[in-house]
Structure formats: C-alpha cells, structure tokens
Amino acid sequence: MRRSALRLSIAFCSTVALLAGCHAATGAKAPSPAGGAANKVAAKPAAVTPANIAMGDSLFNTGGCFNCHGKGGVGAANAPALDGKKWLQLTTGSFDEIVALIVAGVPVEKIKDPTHKRAMGARGGRMALTDPQIQAVAAYVYTLTHK
Ligand code: HEC
C-alpha cells in the first residue's frame, strides 16, 4: 500500500516535474523517460486532467456527493471520508476502482459501516451521471488521495 502510494506520487511528480522541478525537490529517483506511463499501475490516469478535476469538483461539491460525503469528501454522518486513510469499499483507491464504484453505487447490503444508513445510488443516484461526468467526478475523487 505504502509502496504503491509512493510509486503513484512519483508518477504524479514526473508529470508536474516539467513545471515545478518536482524530482529535484523530492529527491525521488528520476523516472524512465516515459515517466509513469511506463508503469500502468503508477501512471496518472489519462482522465485526470485539470478540466475533469474542475468539473468533478463542481459535480461532487454542488451536485450531490457532498450530501453524504461532506464538502471536499471529508466524511459525514451518511458516508465515509474519501481521504484513503481507511477504505471501506475500495482496496487500492485506483482511478478505475473509483470509476467502477461510482457506476455501481453501494447498495445497502454492501455497506460496511452500519452507521451509514443510506445506499449510494448507482451513477450518483439522482445525479444520473453520464460516462464523461463519472470520469470527471472520479478524477476529482482521485486527487483527494493523490495530491
Ligand atoms: C446517499 C448517500 C451517498 C451519496 C449521495 C454518495 N455516496 Fe458514496 N458512499 C456512500 C456509502 C454509504 C458508501 C459506503 C460506506 C460503507 O461501506 O460503510 C459510499 C462509498 C463511496 C466510496 C468508497 C469509499 C471507501 O471507503 O471505500 C467512494 C469513492 C464514493 N462513495 C464516492 C461517491 C461519489 C463520487 C459520489 C457522488 C457521485 C457519492 N459517493 C455519493 C454514500 C453516498
């Protein structure tokens, strides 16, 4: 877990390195010329773009997710924090896993923490998210654990 988080952050770093001189700052080993893209697990997902993150932020924090997960995904009575400290449904917190969870939702019988009383609807329930909106909201959720 820790190791993969490190690899993810190195991958992320390599993508911003051009702008910020990131590896020099972190002392991380220089990634291969292809950067994180050489390693599919560590690569920053292609859908995690500034435009998608911005759209996802708006969908999450004004569209409905925040009603259960709190603004910024900090957690609230009906749903857990999305900070990755202790995933209840996800295992790695990968982008694909986040997408799959949003598509499927969490039916009551799959809820792990009994203090969470309400099912998470498939595709955000009433939000009825389209595939591009799911990519966007997943990109936003992904950034909560991949700064
Ligand atoms: C009606 C309340 C509700 C809404 C609205 C809701 N969720 Fe959830 N969400 C839950 C519950 C309940 C769980 C599972 C918690 C448990 O197992 O105890 C969950 C789990 C998750 C998880 C996995 C967290 C983990 O610990 O593994 C993610 C990611 C997530 N939701 C994202 C979203 C996003 C994105 C939206 C908006 C599209 C959303 N949720 C809207 C209730 C909600």
Image (cartoon, rainbow, N blue to C red):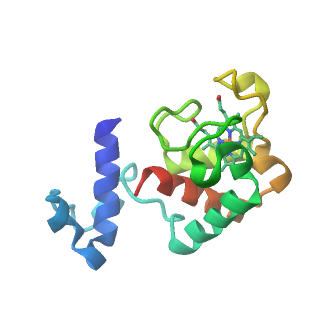
**Ligand 1, image quadrant it occupies:** top right
Q: Residue furthest right?
A: 126
Total numbered labels? 0
Of residue 23 and residue 41, the one placed in the foreground of this image is 23
Q: Residue furthest bottom?
A: 19
Residue 114 coordinates in the image, percent (x, y): 69, 21
Q: Is residue 29 left or right of residue 63?
A: left
Q: Give the quarter of the image for residue 121.
A: top right
Residue 145 coordinates in the image, percent (x, y): 45, 49
Q: Is residue 146 left or right of residue 72?
A: left
Residue at the spot x=26%, y=71% of the render? Answer: 17
Q: Is residue 10 above or below residue 82?
A: below
Q: Give the quarter of the image for residue 62.
A: bottom right
Residue at the spot x=73%, y=40% of the render? Answer: 105
Residue 99 coordinates in the image, percent (x, y): 62, 49
Residue at the spot x=34%, y=44% of the render? Answer: 5
Q: Is residue 18 above or below residue 39?
A: below
> Is there any visible trace of residue 47 in the rendered image?
yes
> Is there any visible trace of residue 38 in the rendered image?
no
Q: Is residue 81 left or right of residue 22?
A: right
Q: Quadrant of the C terminus?
A: bottom left
Q: Quadrant of the N terminus?
A: top left
Q: Give the quarter of the image for residue 10.
A: bottom left
Residue at the spot x=65%, y=48% of the render? Answer: 70
Residue 2 coordinates in the image, percent (x, y): 31, 37
